Amino acid sequence: MIPVAWPIALGAILFMIGVAGVLLRKNIIVMLMSIELMLNSVNLNLVAFSYHLGDLRGQIFAIFTITVAAAEVSVALGILIALVRNRRVFNADKMDTMRG
Amino acid sequence: MFETTVEVIIICIKVGVAGMVLFSLPIPLTWVERKVAGHIQVRLGPFRVGPHGILQPVADMVKMLLKEDVIPTKADKWLFMLAPIMTMVPAFAVFVAIPVGDKFTLPFIGKDITLYMSDMNVAVVYILAVSGLSIYGIIFGGWASNSKYAVMGGLRSAAQMISYEVAMSFAAVGVVMLSNSLSLVEIVKSQSGGLFHWNFLYLPVGPVWFMIFFIAGLAEVNRIPFDLPEDEGSLAAGYHVEYSGMRFAFFMLAEYIAMVTISVLAVIFFLGGWDDPTGVIPLPPILWFVGKVAAFIYLFMWIRFTLPRYRYDQLMTIGWKILIPVSLVCVLVTGLMRI
Amino acid sequence: MEKVFFLIFAAVAVGSALAVVTLKNPVHSALALIACLLQVASVFVLLRSPFLAVVQVFIYVGAVMVLFLFVVMVLDIRQARMEAFPQKERWFVYAIVPVITVELLTVILGKGFPRLGPGSTEATTVEVLGKALFTEYLFPFEVVSVLLLAAMVGAIIMVKKRWD
């Protein structure tokens, strides 16, 4: 039997790595991947609690999270392709047209 | 404790047998493929090595083993070496969930042995998921070669796989709706009782689902008429253009196993698995199963040497504008029929 | 036995997650992310959620990551590769992230965290999940499907070239 704290701790570590990735990297693609990592660690929490409480709702929420993540990726990559086609930049710091 | 040990030993034996069969399967298949090509296109085919060219696969193997293993200078070395293994592992992993028969009792001991490694209750989704993973070898192999043709092959392969995975999953959904189970053993059992209980003949939707599955399957395993990722006319050899020797052989092995997987799945999903169509011929079920799969593999080869290749835009049109709308309508009809 | 497996999967998951963030080449990052997601799927199996594990492999590893790689390969990779790492000017991240991680871990692994008993050893069946999804959670399900449709239309319109 796995204690409930272990998967939660794993989720926390993965989440923080994802946060570090979003903050540190400038490449948009890697930033998006880090966001995926964060979403996934949230799923880990949901499933762990669902298992330990014997409750289905965690798993159902995880299914919704996966679906929303898929939608998010398709839109984000669409934006990225449009952006690169118009501006030829990958660096998130260089996308500052809206800055006053 | 004794029981568990026996179980573990039985599973090890099953894995060993399955692995050996799968590893050696491409050897007869390459020979059959060449001979079928020869007969269909009215040419000789291999004839020089052994009687009727039967030793040709051995010659091929020797050639593959002795060839120099070239790694292009500007290639991404690790990824380049990893890619063939990445296509092969999922191709083998699929077979964990595939049943080849129900169960038989060992003589003398009276112990029941099942002819599958595990009867997962999510087998259909597992197989779709894992067989989809072999695409990574193709994508990474194409990218790591650092060559234009290989990258194009990898790109085409990624786009093609994403498009046809949808139709293929829909076909699997249709089967699950017809059989009321995600377990492959249950799906086969729900079709038992002769030809007219097979999902293929569940009129009117059965044949449509079968065609969707078959076309999507052809595209998934990159066979003609959908072998755009390795189109020798416009891409030299696509994603494996830079590969030689054993690494190339791994790609070929994975491709043949993928073809076998699709045939096995088609037989399990639509043609009743190991079910006897007539109900009167006293053959062991496993022979029925192997026979159906063999017929299917022949069908694949027949198509390969008969049809021309589609253009890339035609491939996309078939996937998105024909297969997916048709399967959506089919889901509706099947749902109404199963209420 | 389960604990050993969990620790192995967790170690590989953390290692590959670090690789996602640190590797310079986006394609290598993608490969590391695939490895990480597969480990998380294995953890799902240990937590008796086989359906979620296969869905994870199917959607995340099978579709989302292929999409990522497709985009990385369509766009010019050589330009994307140019990035200095680690970056000196983001020093505060190096300071803050480890602190928060340690804080989280002390809370989770500490005494105050609720000690839940081990759950049932039975894996959740797809049947139960499906029933819940299509009766109790029908409305969220429909909302998510509309969201997917909207995302699809949005992505197509953004990527499509201007039509005059």
Image (cartoon, rainbow, N blue to C red):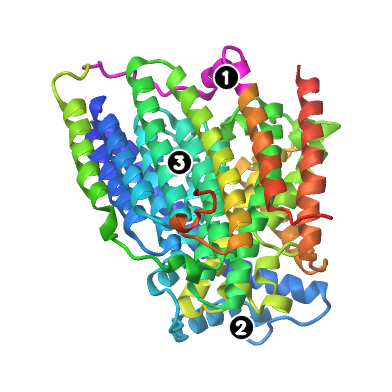
> What subunit carries mark 2?
B
Alpha carbons under labels 1 and 3: distance apart: 30 Å
Residue on which the image places disc 3: B117
Density class for disc 1 (Cα within 10 Å; few <14, some 14-19, many ≥20) is: some
User: For the view shown, which residue lies furthest in the left direction?
Assistant: C111
Quadrant (top left, top right, bottom left, bottom right) of the C terminus of chain B:
top right
**Which x, y percent locates residue A45?**
35, 28
> What subunit carries mark 1?
C
User: Which residues, given as a range, are shown in magenta?
Assistant: C115-141
Alpha carbons under labels 2 and 1: distance apart: 61 Å
Residue on which the image places disc 2: B50
Alpha carbons under labels 3 and 2: distance apart: 37 Å
- In this rendering, do the residues under marks 3 and 2 share a single chain? yes
**Rendered residue at 59%/38% (across/down):** A71
Classify mark 3: helix, strand or loop. loop
Instruction: From the viewer's side, name the closer residue of B113 and A83.
Output: A83
Q: Is residue C134 magenta?
A: yes
> What subunit carries mark 3?
B
Density class for disc 2 (Cα within 10 Å; few <14, some 14-19, many ≥20) is: few
Q: Quadrant of residue C132?
A: top right
Residue C92 vertical position relative to residue B252 in the rendered view, above or below: above
Q: Give the residue type at disc 3.
A: Met
**Which x, y percent locates residue B85?**
44, 64
